Amino acid sequence: MFCNRWVTLWLPFFFLSLGVNSNASMPSEKIEKYIALKLKRNDRVLRINEKSIGDEGAKFLAKSPLLESVETLIIYKGDIRDEGVRALADSRKLVQLTALYLENNHITDQGAIEIASSETFKNLQVLNLYRNKITDKGAKAIAESDTLSRLTEINLNFNEVGDEGTKSLTTSASLKQLKKIGLEYNRLNQAGTESLKKFNIFQSINELKNSKRINEIGSLIHGDLGVMVLKEFSGFSELDNLDLSDSNLTDRSAIAIANTAWLKGLISLNLSSNRITDLGAKALADSKNLSQLKKLNLNFNFIGNLGAKVIAKSSNLAGLKSLKLGQNRVGKSGAKALKESNTLVNLMHPIFGFY
């Protein structure tokens, strides 16, 4: 009985005390001592983890001369809202920042707008706004920012960004140096997901191009979307070998490849184990862009007699030394056309062999 009465009397006071402590922000004096100790170890990086500094604490940081040399600022679970972000964005003490992490706070679109319009943040290369409350409006503000042009990486995981915001970021004309976008656990539908996939493929292709490993491009492509991204590239005249085998490609990809002018230097094209039909075969046969081909692998597709016949008559493919059409749907008439072709006179291997 006594124990129950004690619990009844003290329980409300316990929760009241807990509530006060959880909502209370660190006083300025304590923040100053804390950051001074942190910066004594490394004056270029300030990491504040799970310290409820609140907007008032952010205002204190914005005015503190201790932060004048800081290049990386991390405030994780700092209970910061848009008002605190505004103070940081207006600060003249944070102009050296190249990386800003405001993870797991309470920042909305208004805070994103403050960041996007801030002259203070013009040197930012990394912006991490993981787990906040940012929607398409905030994402668009960042994408259209004139002052964040040096951004190479942005993390908006666990926010409320949808297709519109995703498209703005992935096609931004302002963020030309952006290479990495984090949008996991947002509100993306098919359009947004495709925009992000295209962006990621584009960046990967660019990386191979810059490292002079362009003949490895095929390893990045899976599905027609990847080929559509590849088609948008230029300056790959040195690419001579393209392996897109087993990439789940359809006629759409075959047509895109046939119509891509910068593929004129291709010597070898492998499209085996895909879903290409007569339509795709005709596009390849009619393409003047593929006239330098010496090897064409179309094994394990769905090409029939019609596709075989147009390939047999193609003057654009007259330079072929190796043509593979095994395990397709070519019948007697298609096989006869290939055998009696007056254009495919340089072939050195059986067309229907697996070599």
Image (spheres, rainbow, N blue to C red):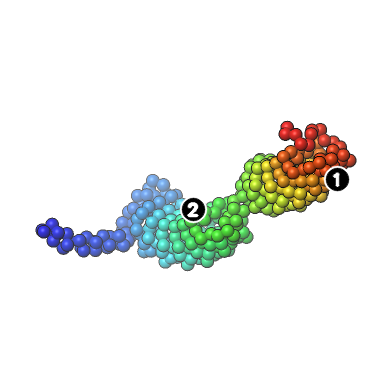
- Front-most of residues 51 and 268: 268
- Front-most of residues 354 and 51: 354
Horizontal and vertical percent position of residue 29: 31, 58
Residue 95 appears anywhere in the view = no
Asked if residue 5 lies left or right of residue 25, the reply is: left
Q: Looking at numbered disc 1 in the image, what kind of residue is underneath it?
A: Lys
* Vertical arrangement, residue 132 with respect to residue 280, above or below: below
* Vertical arrangement, residue 118 with respect to residue 182, above or below: below
Horizontal and vertical percent position of residue 34: 34, 53
Secondary structure at numbered mark 1: helix
Horizontal and vertical percent position of residue 200: 59, 51
Asked if residue 33 lies left or right of residue 234, the reply is: left
Where is mark 2, residue-wise?
99
Asked if residue 197 lies left or right of residue 18, the reply is: right
Of the two numbered discs 1 and 2 on the same chain, state the one appearing first in sequence. 2
Q: Residue at x 54, y 54 (%)?
A: 181
Q: Looking at numbered disc 2 in the image, what kind of residue is underneath it?
A: Ala
- Front-most of residues 77 and 320: 320
Q: Residues within 10 Å of mark 2 (few under 14, many from 20)?
A: many
Instruction: Say which mark, if any, is on residue 313.
Output: 1
Label 1 and label 2: CA atoms lie apart by 60 Å
Q: Residue at x 72, y 51 (%)?
A: 251
Horizontal and vertical percent position of residue 304: 76, 46
Q: Residue at x 49, y 53 (%)?
A: 99
Q: Residues within 10 Å of mark 1 (few under 14, many from 20)?
A: some
Marks counted in the figure total: 2
